Image (cartoon, grey):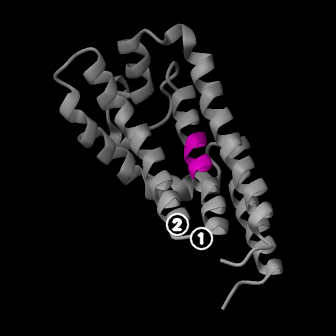
Amino acid sequence: MAESYGVRLLRIFSLTAFCVPAIFAPDGWALTINQALMIWFHEAGHAVFGVFSDSPPYGTALMFFGGSLMQLLVPTMFTGVVFAAGKRFDAALMCLWIGLNAFAVGYYCADAKARALPLIFGMDKGLHDWWNIELFLGLGPWHGWLVAFWWALGLACYAVAVVGGLYVAPESD
């Protein structure tokens, strides 16, 4: 049975209301819930891309970047599968998940200089991903631009989700 237009609008509103606070609160409940799930994919990304770590400096940087990359690839792949299944409305809304992860990566990137965020399992601050990425690739002077990129990506994903969701909401899958 197809979902009604009103139910779809309610889904857009409620999921957006859940995700929007992540823009303003890095320690808020939306990102906290997301990180509880995504930390495992993030850490797996280090292992997956760690095979390149023997080719410094870029291989080591890729190993550190692998966590953030995997954190974005997982929801992107799920979104692609849902879209390929013909569920355009659901795929549009899943862009909120991609955006939520872009904000999470942005907050982590923003912490590169201070390294104040606690790392998993109490790891040493010298293992902060974005501090190492900026160090190995000489991106320190571009720090502000990197953070702005992640925020812009998050906002773009939110916009695609809401506008795309509203556009396809009248259709039935």
Position of residue 14 measured from the top left corner of the image (x, y, whole percent): 75, 67
Compared across the picture, whether 135 is left or right of 24 comes to: left
Q: Mark 2 points at which residue?
A: 82
Residue kind at label 1, given as amino acid type = Lys
In the image, 1 versus 157, the foreground residue is 1
Give the main secondary structure of the magenta stretch: helix
Can residue 124 be seen at all in this image of the molecule? no
Task: Count every numbered label the image shows and give the total.
Answer: 2
Question: Please, what secondary structure does the residue beneath circle 1 have?
Answer: loop
Position of residue 153 measured from the top left corner of the image (x, y, whole percent): 63, 37
Q: In which quarter of the image is the C terminus?
A: bottom right
Q: Mark 2 or 1 closer to N-term?
A: 2
In the image, 112 versus 163, the foreground residue is 163
- Tell me which residue sits at (49%, 54%) in the image: 75
- Tell me which residue sits at (62%, 28%) in the image: 149
Position of residue 22 measured from the top left corner of the image (x, y, whole percent): 67, 47
Can residue 125 be seen at all in this image of the molecule? yes
In the image, 21 versus 149, the foreground residue is 149
Question: Is 129 rendered above or below residue 118?
Answer: above
| Residue 87: numbered disc | 1
Find out whether the residues at labels 2 and 1 contact each other: C-beta distance under 8 Å.
yes
Compared across the picture, whether 118 is left or right of 52 comes to: right
Q: Quadrant of the N terminus?
A: bottom right
Extent of the magenta region: 98-103
